[in-house]
Image (cartoon, rainbow, N blue to C red):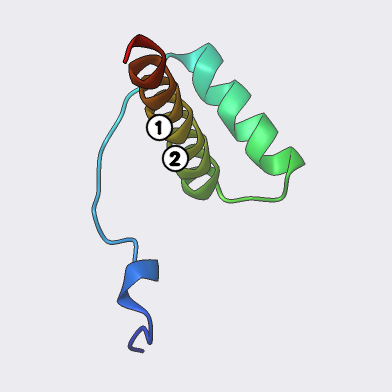
């Protein structure tokens, strides 16, 4: 099956390791929101990355 919009394709893999407590918390929250664990973790990373970038842009505009 080919993607019509290649920008939606998620084919880059990053492995990450978590302690037992964090892993169980991630699984529980993903289950609560009816998401696959990998999808939930990706959403968290994308949201945090967006927040960091936004903060950096705001900081730079305030110092200019």
On-image quarter of the N terminus:
bottom left
Say if 38 sits above or below 48 in the image. below
Q: Could you say where residue 58 lies in the image, as x and y percent from the top left? A: 44, 22
* Outermost residue toward the front in this view: 64
Could you tell whether 4 is left or right of 22 in the image? left
Look at the image and tell me whether residue 49 can be seen.
yes
Residue corresponding to mark 2: 46
Q: Residue 7 is drawn in which quadrant?
A: bottom left
User: Which numbered tag is attached to residue 49?
Assistant: 1
- Spatial CA span between label 1 and label 2: 5 Å
Could you tell whether 13 is left or right of 56 in the image? left
**Does dot 1 land on a helix, a strand or a loop?**
helix
Q: Residues within 10 Å of mark 1 (few under 14, many from 20)?
A: few
Which residue is more in the foreground, 50 or 27?
50
**Does dot 2 land on a helix, a strand or a loop?**
helix
* Contact (Cβ within 8 Å) of mark 1 with mark 2: yes
Look at the image and tell me whether residue 18 can be seen.
no
Residue displayed at 48% across by 15% down: 20
Say if 26 sits above or below 8 in the image. above
Residue displayed at 54% across by 13% down: 21
């Amino acid at each position: 099956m080919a993607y019509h919009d290649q920008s939606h394709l998620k084919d880059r893999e990053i492995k990450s390791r978590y302690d037992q407590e964090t892993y169980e918390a991630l699984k529980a929250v993903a289950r609560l929101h009816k998401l696959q664990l990998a999808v939930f973790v990706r959403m968290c990373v994308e949201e945090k990355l967006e927040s960091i970038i936004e903060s950096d842009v705001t900081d730079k505009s305030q110092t200019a």
